[in-house]
Amino acid sequence: MTNREKIEAAKEKFGILLEEQLARVEKMKNEADFVDYSKLDKIIIGVTGGDGIGPAITREAERVLEYLLKDEIASGKVEIRDIPGLTIEHRVECMQAVPDDVMDELKKCHVILKGPTTTPRKGDPWPNIESANVAMRKELDLFANVRPVKVPEQGIDWVFYRENTEGAYAVGSKGAVVDEDLSVDFTVVTSQGTERVIRAAFDFAAKNGRTRVTAVTKANIIKATDGKFLDIFYRVAKEYPEITADDWYIDIMTAKLVDEKRRRDFQVVVLPNLYGDIITDEAAEFQGGVGTAGSSNIGKRYAMFEAIHGSAPRMVAEGRDKYADPCSMMRASVLLLRHIGFKDKADKFEKALDICTQTERKIYTTGRDTGATGEEVTNYIMETIEKL
């Protein structure tokens, strides 16, 4: 193949990619605005336990939600709806990442609390089906991955808004291998996709008493895509004059997070997909690693809240699931409460978690019978909430 033929083949592939992305832009132009939960007659919270230790720890988080929302549930303002079927067994039976019957029920809810799910890998006894998380993000258009990181004794209280559907990951499997010497990948940024995640970050800050939102890019070098992200950031920022807006480049931001003086200044951070993946893993190390916090995936119509860690099937096989730590699901529940407008209840829940897991720590799980059960930890947390 001549160089000209190679170039024409790559151009054809790039043209198909552009057609797909332009079609996606048109779809986003017609999407509805963010749900205003305060205007809903009833907020439906779907709870699906997943598999492995998921049902055990999700059940404990649900207990606390029922306790905190008991008045709203009694009045009919809130409904907590259990949705079974997201187990690996049912998913394999249907050969679907999220079975149709489960997805239909999830779509009847406004927000979802989701337990960990097993994603088969090579050597597992299960067939190779797609991650339930990936499938839910695609089907429900959950475009913002939100991760909080909090270490009070170090003055760290960060919330990261990572764009979840674009950037360097959007078409990661659709790059062009021109020949054995040249390969090209693509970064995708749209005005619609960028604005919605930036607006979500500012809305969160405004509703939760945050006074600073920071954008992270490499706009001085990657001018077209990161430049667009930064331009839209400052345009949206003008609508929130009470909030300070600033920006940092990704390389120096990774350094400033380990700067003991400067890192205390950051509050809400919004950033493209790849940078968000890197920064949130670095940030999580300050509080003990990626398995120590809850995570949320936000869309305009739906939102899903989950633990970051996996389903730990070995614990179930060894009969230790009742000793699994439910606090990651509870951190996710804090995010859920904030998202639907129950800030005071979320603050009280989070304060109790901080006391029980960091300050007092009277009882704690070890994953074995040497520690407390998830039920005992939950009782301790609920007793602490009652005292606040």
Image (cartoon, rainbow, N blue to C red):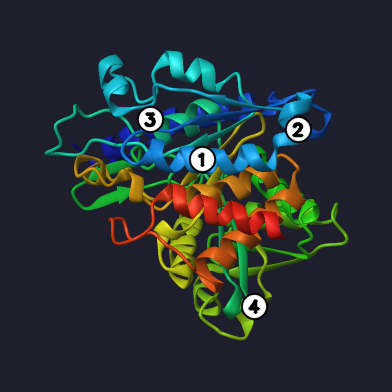
Name the mark on residue 314: none
Q: Earlier in the sequence, mark 2 or mark 4?
A: 2
Q: Quadrant of residue 76?
A: top right
Q: Residue type at mark 2?
A: Glu
Secondary structure, mark 2, is helix
Q: Residue type at mark 4?
A: Arg
- Determine the CA span between mark 2 and mark 1: 34 Å
Q: Position of residue 150 (x, y in %)?
A: 57, 67
Crowd band around label 1 with a 10 angstrom C-alpha radius: few (<14), some (14–19), many (20+): many
In the picture of the structure, the residue carrying the numbered disc 1 is 165
In the picture of the structure, the residue carrying the numbered disc 2 is 72
For this orientation, the residue located farthest to the bottom is 261
Q: Residue type at mark 1?
A: Thr
Secondary structure, mark 1, is loop
In the picture of the structure, the residue carrying the numbered disc 4 is 264
Residues at marks 1 and 4 touching, judged by CB atoms closer than 8 Å:
no
